[in-house]
Image (tube, rainbow, N blue to C red):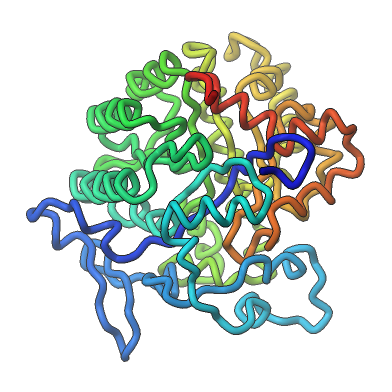
Amino acid sequence: MSGLPYPTYDADHHFYEPPEALMRHLPKEYKHAISYVQVNGRTKLAIGGQITDYIPDPTFDHVAAPGKLVDWYSGKNPEGMTMRESMGKPISAKTAWRTGEDRLKELDEQGVTGALMFPTLVSAVEERMGQYDIKAMCAIMHSLNQWMLEEWNFNRKNRIFTAPVISLADIDWAVNELEWALKNGAKTVLVRPAPVPGIAGSRSPGFKEFDPFWARINESKIFVSMHASDSGYDRFVRMWIGGNEFRPFAPSAFSHILKPAARVIADTITALICHGVFDRFPDVKVATIENGAAWVGDLLKTMAKAHKVFPQEFKYDPVQRFKENVYVAPFYEDSLDILREAVGADRVLFGSDYPHPEGVASPLDFINRLDAYTDAEKKKVMGGNLLGLLERSGSLQ
């Protein structure tokens, strides 16, 4: 099954949601919360009555081909093309990017044993609704989760592990949704890396008010996936240049240097460590997905210094806590040998971001970035580490 001489498990695959994914199970009282509208002959997504350009084509009828942005993100752009220009001509989305059974066949063709599977569109919802209509936001998330269960399953033949989406904005709902996900076979859940939104303002996901969720994660031994999302950190770019919405497909040199995406995952992990989640629940494991790894080294250095300056605020060495409780899926273009030196090969996950244009077109090509790793370490990164996380809550055999 695998194109390598051992099982391979990819930590970052995606499907493209059709419009019904967010709406099929949405209760009537929340039908107003999300809709697809026509604007100048193009379909746009409206969330809470506000049209968003976060995703240019929310129907995903036409998408960029897998792997089209690998060179662009690797700095191979001598002609100075924009991201959109580098993505090239759109293609029609394959059925394997829409349905589970066809995706299994594609995994076979790719030589991939199994993969975590994440939605694409729902990443726009929490940032746009979490400050003013939490009940509607949770209803949309549950509608998507029900659709995923019906169309993909949370565990499809021990090969595709789809991640139900959970917001901590309503802690009672979050715990109930987690229980429902566990009963339906989930091996991981997707939580946005960001402060938890709320009507009265945002706060750390590490605060004790969220302990019921982390306690159940700790008890069940499934892990939390923190996949890159619209986390609201684009506001730090907009403070300088203006604008009113995050547009991920229109970056600039300025936004690239400010690194809002790296900042938010570093801040989120810092919040979990400094606010004691792993002290209170040491069996909680978090996988950072599609957030890259460039932020890890600086964060660990800063944590080590903070530990010396404020030893009274830590029950445990924060650097060691990171190494024990956090897994990192680096970008293809990251320095993977530096990551290994920082956290060890046991905490590195291979993630291709397939079929998105930012990732590699052939997932197992990721191994080409592991030249400095031993064969035993390659086996861990290309599958063993993720398999270990998946089996914490029960064997896949």
Residue 56 in percent (x, y) is at 44, 75
- Residue 341 vs 122, above or below: the answer is above
Q: In the rendered view, would you say 335 is above or below 22?
A: above
The percent coordinates of residue 35 (x first, y second) are 23, 68
Q: Residue at x 47, y 11 (%)?
A: 280
Q: Quadrant of residue 318?
A: top right
Which residue is located at x 43 percent, y 36 percent?
Answer: 155
Tell which residue pokes out farthest to the left in this image: 29
Left/right of residue 69 with respect to residue 21 in the rendered view: right
Foreground residue among 105 and 248:
105
> As rendered, which of 335 and 255 lies closer to the eye?
335
The residue located at (81%, 43%) in the rendering is 336
Residue at the (25%, 77%) spot, across then down: 37
Count the labels in the image.
0
Q: Is residue 232 visible?
A: no
Picture quadrant where residue 170 is located: top left
* In the foreground, 189 or 298: 189
Q: State which quarter of the image contains the N terminus.
A: top right
In this rendering, position of residue 118 left or right of residue 327: left
Residue 158 place in picture, x, y as percent = 50, 34
Q: Is residue 207 visible?
A: yes
Vertical order, 136 against 303 (above or below) = below
Looking at the picture, how far across and down is residue 96, in whole percent?
Answer: 49, 61
The quarter of the rendered structure image containing the C terminus is top right
Residue 161 shown left or right of residue 73 in the figure: left
Question: Which sits in the foreground, 85 or 273?
Answer: 85
